[in-house]
């Protein structure tokens, strides 16, 4: 393989040499490029990039320069020299190879392009994510989530949240961002985007995972904080409203899906992932496989729901999934179930809005009103903490309406 070198080039010999080693930095750079089998044309470009950088900071040796000096040089190329972006990339690659491979500097992996960014009507220069660094962080984060058994939906939500966080900071690598940058992003979500508390909490969980687990930052738990969770009581449909909703379903398939959500207190995705073998007719239970938190549980199989399933199976003839999707060997999506519920609600003419989630809330509240113990409802819903289930004590009418008001206990009732 041909090796590019500049014998007799005073610039390379003078500024990229080390008095303490017999081999100059120029020769070491050439040897490293040959060892990694870089093409001769790439060797030539890398050598020119390092020589131009050394010329800019002479007489200071390149070994004494830092990442800030590289950023200063890249700004000079972008703003003063107006160097095209493609040529800037070549310079960055050359400097990353020189400092990362030849000199063994860890900060070389974070070297990045300097690109124009429009901000507030004016063009500023900002740093773009280093080549491959964001991809490496993404891959490491996926590996960490996989090792901890997080669900595919959590993978998607966390990666999307981290991607938007990086975009907000002009594609700055997350390793260079600190707690103040996270705080600024949280304030942006709350003040400007006005996101709900639940949406902000998901983003906070993603950033905590990124910095605490993947990047191993000790400040992640203390500095990335949750907001105070507001207590909003869900709107509970009455049994009559649920019956009217089910009767308004456009198709027997839709009626079975909504009946399963209400009759077993299932979440939307749990309904979508039901299989034929999960319906245990002998024991009259439904097996919920890897529900929220990847936990299995069992719920009751209502005789009314069983009749609906049998009627539905005569015409649909499902094989593996109880509710197969459009593509072969896939199940229906959760969004399709929500759409079916929305269409049934519109047709029913009910004023109170009913969603798949409110059907699950109705399941728990109506059980409590019928005298079922709170611990049993907790197991049916799949709650890990009893405090999560206790919210339904605020919704059950038998505990609220049966309590006498102190107004009725006054010795002299108020007159009309």
Image: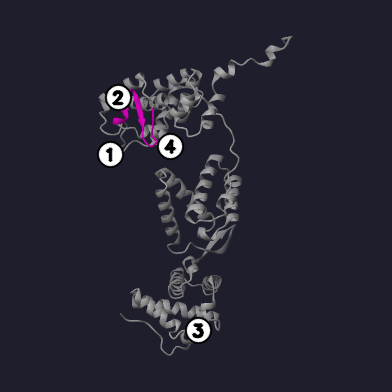
Q: Nearer the viewer, mark 1 or mark 3?
A: 3
Q: Nearer the viewer, mark 4 or mark 3?
A: 4
Q: Check if residue 413 falls in the magenta segment.
A: no
Mark 4–mark 3 CB contact (< 8 Å): no
**Mark found first going from the N terminus, 4 or 3:** 3
At a point 53% along the width and 81% down the height, the residue shown is: 61
**Mark found first going from the N terminus, 2 or 1:** 2
| Mark carried by residue 292 | 4
Q: CA distance from mark 2 to mark 3?
A: 81 Å
Mark 1–mark 3 CB contact (< 8 Å): no
Q: Residues within 10 Å of mark 3 (few under 14, many from 20)?
A: many
Residues 240 and 360: in front is 360
**Mark found first going from the N terminus, 1 or 3:** 3
From this viewpoint, is residue 228 visible? yes
Quadrant of the rendered image containing residue 265: top left
| Mark carried by residue 329 | 1
225 lies above or below 104: above
Q: Nearer the viewer, mark 2 or mark 3?
A: 3
- The residue carrying mark 2 is 312
| Mark carried by residue 370 | none
At a point 41% along the width and 43% down the height, the residue shown is: 151
Q: Residues within 10 Å of mark 1 (few under 14, many from 20)?
A: few
**Mark 1 element type:** loop
Mark 4–mark 1 CB contact (< 8 Å): no
- In the rendering, at what x and y percent does residue 132 appear? 42, 62
- The residue carrying mark 3 is 15
Mark 2–mark 3 CB contact (< 8 Å): no
**Mark 3 element type:** helix
């Amino acid at each position: 393989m041909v090796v590019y070198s500049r014998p007799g080039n005073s610039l390379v010999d003078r500024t990229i040499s080390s008095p303490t080693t017999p081999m100059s930095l120029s020769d070491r750079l050439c040897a490293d490029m040959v060892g990694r089998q870089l093409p001769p044309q790439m060797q030539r470009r890398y050598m020119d990039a390092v020589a131009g950088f050394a010329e800019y900071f002479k007489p200071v040796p390149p070994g004494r320069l830092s990442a800030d000096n590289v950023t200063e040089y890249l700004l000079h190329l972008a703003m003063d020299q107006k160097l095209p972006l493609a040529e800037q990339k070549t310079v960055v690659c050359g400097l990353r190879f020189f400092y990362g491979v030849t000199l063994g500097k860890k900060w070389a992996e974070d070297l990045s392009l300097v690109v124009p960014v429009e901000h507030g009507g004016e063009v500023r220069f900002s740093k773009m994510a280093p080549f491959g660094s964001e991809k490496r962080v993404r891959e490491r984060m996926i590996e960490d989530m996989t090792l901890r058994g997080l669900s595919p939906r959590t993978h998607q939500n966390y990666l999307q949240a981290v991607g938007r966080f990086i975009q907000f900071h002009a594609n700055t690598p997350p390793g260079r961002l600190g707690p103040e940058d996270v705080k600024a992003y949280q304030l942006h979500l709350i003040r400007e985007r006005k996101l709900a508390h639940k949406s902000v909490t998901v983003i906070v969980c993603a950033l905590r995972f990124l910095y605490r687990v993947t990047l191993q930052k000790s400040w992640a738990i203390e500095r990335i904080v949750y907001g105070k969770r507001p207590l909003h009581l869900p709107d509970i449909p009455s049994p009559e409203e649920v019956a009217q909703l089910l009767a308004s379903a456009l198709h027997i398939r839709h009626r079975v899906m909504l009946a399963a959500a209400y009759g077993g207190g299932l979440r939307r995705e749990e309904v979508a992932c039901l299989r034929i073998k999960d319906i245990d007719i002998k024991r009259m239970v439904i097996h919920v496989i890897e529900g929220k938190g990847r936990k299995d549980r069992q719920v009751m199989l209502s005789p009314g729901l069983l009749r609906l399933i049998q009627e539905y199976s005569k015409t649909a003839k499902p094989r593996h999934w109880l509710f197969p999707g459009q593509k072969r060997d896939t199940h229906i999506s959760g969004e399709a179930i929500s759409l079916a519920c929305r269409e049934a609600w519109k047709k029913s003419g009910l004023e109170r809005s009913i969603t798949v989630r409110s059907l699950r809330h109705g399941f728990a509240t109506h059980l409590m009103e019928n005298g079922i113990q709170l611990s049993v409802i907790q197991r049916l819903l799949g709650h890990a903490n009893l405090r999560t289930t206790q919210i339904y004590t605020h919704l059950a009418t038998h505990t609220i309406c049966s309590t006498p008001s102190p107004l009725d206990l006054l010795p002299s009732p108020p007159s009309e």
